[in-house]
Image (cartoon, rainbow, N blue to C red):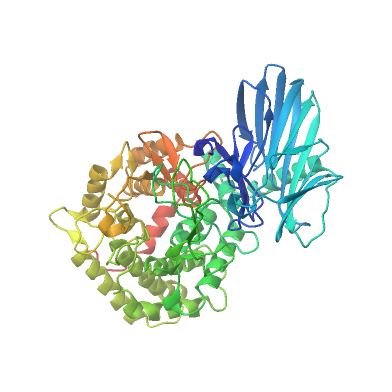
């Protein structure tokens, strides 16, 4: 069984990533890509499913940190006989096409007895490979896959694992280099793992020097930007939601989903986070990724794609894994890629609008694609869908989906009005106003003085916090105030926001609790900022910062009762939301991201 989520740190190479526990154990690694099969899967099972541990045989405590402005992790172990530091990183792939994981044990003081344990298990922890001893260490082979471990330390194999014991004194540096390659490719070795580690640190420091992270929350914003960059596929520009699958929304529950893919619902917030942080190259790459995946028949636009734009993400269960703390099933793939979610049309249109506002040069065919999306929404906006939360019950007229359909039409109109693009702008204005009126008529419950989750329903949904954020209604509209008050009254748990009250009739899943949803809690802070409630926004933001783990990472959800992070980890959308809210509440920065997006709307009569 893996450690608590709070006890993991992230390392990665912009193609895949690994989770390292504070005990020095790598319990999750997929190679060669984020969405590849795992070779270490103890996180979702037992140690028999693969792990790689390096730590003193006995030690009193461990502390850790990232080197400043990098993704190079340093774990300091204090033992009775001395102190050692374990340095972990994954170099950015340049001369090598395949991933490498570097681990250096550095002696600080005294003489410490160290122990290494390695259990390679391909196919998500199921397959024990054939291991051969080599002059540089060992090679593990199984089918198409191969891993090689290079180290000067002598290893012993028994019980389908490999072990090593060695001593480290002051100034000693003992390297371990794990490299993945196809079993059809030849082996290769590295000359100087220490120099490659320093090069990796320098790469990250050079990259973060380009970020606009000034202000009182610069440390938190920088760490979140590094995390977001680490979850970016460098070849495509796509950003995966998380490097993990099936980490539960409730311990022991069934709401366990594969998040190693790219979601369109996060698109506009992601672009704002990049642009407001000065990362225009990354923003353009993200816009271009969206353009490629949206190309095709508009009615077939998906909500989820693979890291380089793959469409087919079939979902199946890994029944040999017992799940994180017994949370079954463990799923690979995501059936939600086949759902209809109307909000993705608004996200695509809003991303292109924001990109133009930011001065990112249009591509030759982007407006043509957008016009095709508008042709679909001409009638498509009336459809029922699965909503932002990808419910597996029957489709409904979800309020958030209709609001984002309005966003799509509004940004199409703005494209004509503000950028001189060609289109039937009068017709689009009429359709925009028609959707606006439809939402006000069917989604607002006058008795509750609040918008509801779906047409004809009575329950709340935290996605309704988007209504003022996208400019659908002014933040001082009494219906917005009423909805916010209802959410504060009914969806807050110890100050954090639930997405909604689970209902099996809507979700199509067995009833079970889930943690509070951290991106929605950041949206609440954004609402406070937009309404001029600055101190409340700051207080809530500080509360959110306080639940980060010791290296500044957050997951998707948080259990306020047990004080534990839940859901896939670390979560890109949570860190995107942190970045935006930090910019939104920082004084003297001019117009904030939330003000810009809210101002983008406002084209329909707010009555």
- Horizontal and vertical percent position of residue 175: 78, 38
Quick one: 508 or 97, which is closer to the camera?
508
- Image quarter for residue 87? top right
Q: Residue at x 38, y 74 (%)?
A: 413
Give the residue at the far left of this rendering.
447
Quick one: 457 or 403, which is closer to the camera?
457
Query: Is residue 177 shown left or right of residue 298?
Result: right
Quick one: 140 or 196, which is closer to the camera?
140
- Relative to 427, is 325 above or below? above
Q: Quadrant of the C terminus?
A: bottom left
Q: Residue at x 55, y 72 (%)?
A: 292
Query: Is residue 134 shown left or right of residue 422?
Result: right
- Image quarter for residue 108? top right
Give the residue at the far front of this rendering.
159
- Horizontal and vertical percent position of residue 237: 60, 62
- Horizontal and vertical percent position of residue 304: 48, 64
- Image quarter for residue 236? bottom right
Query: Is residue 205 shown left or right of residue 22?
Result: right
Q: Residue at x 66, y 34 (%)?
A: 74
Q: Can see residue 264?
A: yes
Quick one: 108 or 125, which is closer to the camera?
125
- Horizontal and vertical percent position of residue 310: 56, 68
Query: Is residue 136 shown left or right of residue 473?
Result: right
Q: Can see residue 542?
A: no
């Amino acid at each position: 069984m893996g450690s608590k989520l709070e006890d993991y740190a992230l390392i990665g190479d912009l193609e895949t990533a690994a989770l390292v526990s504070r005990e020095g154990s790598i319990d999750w690694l997929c190679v060669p890509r984020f969405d590849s099969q795992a070779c270490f899967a103890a996180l979702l099972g037992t140690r028999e499913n693969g792990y790689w541990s390096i730590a003193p045989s006995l030690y009193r405590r461990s502390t850790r940190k990232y080197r400043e402005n990098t993704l190079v992790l340093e774990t300091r172990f204090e033992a009775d006989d001395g102190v050692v530091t374990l340095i972990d990183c994954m170099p950015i792939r340049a001369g090598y096409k395949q991933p490498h994981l570097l681990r250096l044990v550095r002696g600080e003081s005294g003489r410490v007895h160290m122990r290494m344990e390695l259990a390679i298990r391909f196919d998500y922890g199921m397959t024990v490979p054939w291991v051969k001893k080599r002059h540089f260490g060992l090679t593990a082979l199984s089918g198409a896959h191969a891993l090689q471990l290079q180290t000067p330390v002598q290893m012993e194999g028994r019980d389908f694992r490999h072990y090593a014991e060695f001593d480290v004194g002051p100034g000693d540096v003992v390297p371990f280099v794990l490299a993945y390659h196809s079993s059809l490719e030849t082996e290769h070795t590295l000359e100087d793992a220490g120099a490659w580690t320093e090069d990796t640190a320098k790469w990250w420091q050079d990259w973060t020097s380009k970020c606009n992270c000034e202000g009182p929350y610069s440390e938190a914003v920088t760490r979140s930007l590094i995390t977001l960059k680490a979850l970016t596929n460098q070849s495509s520009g796509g950003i995966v939601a998380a490097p993990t699958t099936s980490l539960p929304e409730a311990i022991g529950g069934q709401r366990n989903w594969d998040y190693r893919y790219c979601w369109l619902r996060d698109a506009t917030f992601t672009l704002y986070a990049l642009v407001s942080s000065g990362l225009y190259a990354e923003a353009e790459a993200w816009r271009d990724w969206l353009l490629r995946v949206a190309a095709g028949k508009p009615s077939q636009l998906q909500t989820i794609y693979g890291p380089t734009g793959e469409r087919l993400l079939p979902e199946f269960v890994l029944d040999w894994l017992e799940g994180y703390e017994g949370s079954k099933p463990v799923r690979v793939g995501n059936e939600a890629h086949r759902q209809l979610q109307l909000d993705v049309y608004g996200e695509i249109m809003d991303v292109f609008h924001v990109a133009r506002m930011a001065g990112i040069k249009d591509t030759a065919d982007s407006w043509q694609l957008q016009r095709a999306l508008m042709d679909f929404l001409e009638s498509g906006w009336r459809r029922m869908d699965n909503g932002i939360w990808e419910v597996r019950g029957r489709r409904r007229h979800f309020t958030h989906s209709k609001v984002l359909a309005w966003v799509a039409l509004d940004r199409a109109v703005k494209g004509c009005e503000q950028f001189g693009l060609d289109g039937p702008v009068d017709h689009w204005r009429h359709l925009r106003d028609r959707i606006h009126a439809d939402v006000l008529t069917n989604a607002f419950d006058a008795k509750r003085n609040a918008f509801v989750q779906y047409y004809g329903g009575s329950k709340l949904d935290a996605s309704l916090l988007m209504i003022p954020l996208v400019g659908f209604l002014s933040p001082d509209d009494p219906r917005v105030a009423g909805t916010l008050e209802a959410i504060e009254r009914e969806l807050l748990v110890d100050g954090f926001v639930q997405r909604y009250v689970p209902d099996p009739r809507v979700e199509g899943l067995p009833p079970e609790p889930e943690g509070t949803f951290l991106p929605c809690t950041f949206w609440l802070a954004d609402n406070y900022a937009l309404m001029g409630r600055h101190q409340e926004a700051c207080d809530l933001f500080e509360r959110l910062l306080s639940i980060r783990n010791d290296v500044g990472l957050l997951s998707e959800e948080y259990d306020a009762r047990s004080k534990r992070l839940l859901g896939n980890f670390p979560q890109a959308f949570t860190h995107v939301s942190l970045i935006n809210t930090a910019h939104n509440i920082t004084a003297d920065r001019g117009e904030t991201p939330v003000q810009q997006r809210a101002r983008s709307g406002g084209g329909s009569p707010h009555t």
